[in-house]
Image (cartoon, rainbow, N blue to C red):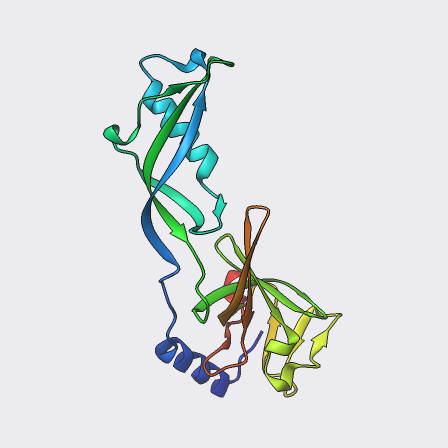
Amino acid sequence: MYLPPHQQQQNKQQQDQSPVSANMFYVTTLEHEIVLEPVYFGPKLRATIVRLLKEEVEGLALATYGYVVNVIEVLEDQIKSGIIEYDTGNVVFTVKYTALLLRPFINEVLDATVSQCNSLGFFAFVGPLRIFVSKHSMPEDMFNGYDGEKDAWISDDKEVIISSGCGVRLKIKGRTVESGNITAIGTIKDNYLGLVDDGEAAN
């Protein structure tokens, strides 16, 4: 998609002036319980615990903390002695670990990639976080601009086209946690928000 010179200049101003935040990524210490069958006991016990920890928590959405992006470190002294479950023979280990997490904050400004458009608005992703922007949260000149054939939102002057693969700058207005998944609601109806990348470079 071609961007006219004044739109390119506006995008440059957005990139230079908009307060895009990196605060949604942060590092903290968490705890998790690992249940092991006796067959795993042996010289590689610690490595097994760390492997299972990563498998169980990475990509998990925790209501209070957000998405666990990556387990950074598990110190030797942070794996507590196991507690035996007498009915099964399994052992429960409580593990304290350092992790990189992703958590959206209300009114935080983010750059996202559009994944899907429909007549109600569009969906965009920031890493694993899915954000929905309603047509009511778009500028007035785009409110009736959905084009079903192009599967895109188009401004009245045809100079702004939001479609799958485009980059948009948006503001988080709300978030919900359901079934271990975090979703958010965003808006592009504010200064320095909207289209920042037409997606052509990726094609």
User: What residue is drawn where x is 38% and y is 13%?
Assistant: 41
The number of numbered discs placed on residues in the rendered structure image is 0
Compared to 165, does 65 lie above or below?
above
Q: Which of 82 and 41 is in front in this view?
A: 82
Tell me if 170 is positioned left or right of 12 in this view: right
Image quadrant in which you'd find residue 58:
top left
| Residue 125: % across, % down | 53, 59
Tell me if 52 is positioned left or right of 189 in this view: left
User: What residue is drawn where x is 39% and y is 50%?
Assistant: 101
Tell me if 96 is positioned left or right of 170 in this view: left
Residue 169 visible in this rendered orientation of the protein: no
Image quadrant in which you'd find residue 17:
bottom left
Image quadrant in which you'd find residue 102:
bottom left
Compared to 158, does 69 lie above or below?
above
User: What residue is drawn where x is 45% and y is 79%?
Assistant: 11
Q: In which quarter of the image is the C terminus?
A: bottom right
